[in-house]
Amino acid sequence: MEKSTVEQILKIVETVYGTYTKSNWIPKPYADNKSRYLWTDAYGVCNFLTLYRETNDIKYLEQADALINNVHDILGHQRNGKKRLGTATAEYPTRGGLRIGKVEDEGSYDGDGQYFHYLTKWAFALSRMAKVKNDQRYIRWAVDLIKAIHPHFIYRDRNDQLHMYWKMSIDLTYPVVPSEGNLDPYDGYVTYRLIDEMAEERELEKEIADMKSMVDIKYSHYRSSDPLDLGEALWITHWYSDELWAKAITSKSLQALEELWQHGDFREPLNRRLAFREFGTTIGVQVNDKASEEWKSRINEIHNLWLPHLYKRDKDISPVMLCTSLRPGVISRHYLQ
């Protein structure tokens, strides 16, 4: 990674998470999101791990660890902070799932709860920590998380066909959004497999089979016109790119992104667009080998467009995802091989 890119990432990381102090460093809280936000912090952990691998400076590994612990301490507790979720303990902090970190309580529109695709993103971040640090404890936490959430997000209809809820309550007792996320089965299938392959003992065969059955039914019907969704699809499929479902979704996603580009969606006024959704695209096309060189040449154009406006809408999710887009690092299957 070029020195200028490292410096750019470091400046953003310090702005978002605060200046590193070696003694008991705790990441700076997000003012707008009840201190922590699960999706953003999953990317944050991966960014710190990439910085560690690029610079060999142990402080970035320590920051990744501190961020993980802080997320578990805050989002693994009820909103009042008095009790851990489910059967979680200090030693096993993910056994009740993890809250999103929304500002509003779960009773309000767009309130707190548990999102499946945030939980899998966190489980993936834990798997990267396990790989970089060579420590099975993080895989244990990822497996515990999957075991805790899977029975609550997955259900069978009258025809005995599996489906998923998009969002559950904080205590996982009822669905808040009963519809199914467009990518959730694929996200779960890939994340579960990656974690199970790293575990000392295979524990997720049933959960993987559940996800595979949904993937097999859904993949031929995949559609999206959202840049984040399409970029995430390219990231998901690049892990097992030779499988039929992955080839089909990769092809559809790249075609849809090209249509968005030609239609002018990436040239709309910025007040009609969201930076982090477009960084989802720029991350996906970088890690997926099937993306064209022409698409990859557009990445800098998108980065440079958003840089002067990076903190205007939010001060966390967009800057943190830009760091990942500047250097995908550990989120790519090629990087840690």
Image (tube, grey):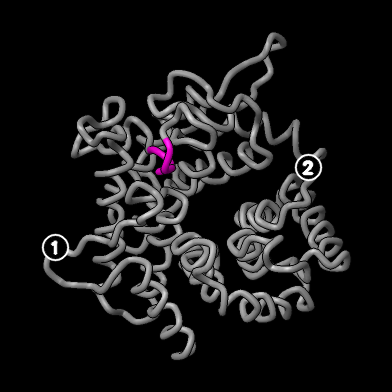
Vertically, is 85 above or below 271?
A: above
Question: Is mark 1 in CB contact (under 8 Å) with mark 2?
Answer: no
Q: Which residues are magenta?
A: 99-104
Q: Is residue 235 magenta?
A: no
Indicate the position of residue 325 as horizontal and vertical percent values.
56, 70
Instruction: Work out whether residue 54 or residue 241 is closer to the camera in this orientation and state it.
Output: 54
Q: What residue is pinned by disc 1?
A: 24
In which image quadrant can residue 309 be found?
A: bottom right
Classify residue 184 by image quadrant: top right
- Residue position for label 2: 222
Looking at this view, name the residue that lies furthest to the left: 23
Question: Is residue 175 something one can see in this rendering?
Answer: yes
The CA distance from mark 1 to mark 2 is 46 Å
Residue at the image position 68 percent from the left and 68 percent from the top: 270
**Type of amino acid under label 1:** Asn
Q: Amino acid at mark 2?
A: Tyr
Asked if residue 97 lies left or right of residue 213, the reply is left
Q: Position of residue 22 (x, y in %)?
A: 15, 72
Q: Can you see residue 203?
A: no
238 or 35: nearer the eye?
Answer: 35
Quick check: is 102 in the magenta stretch?
yes
**Percent from the top left, x then y, of residue 280?**
62, 61
Q: Give residue 249's position: percent from left, percent from top.
A: 76, 50
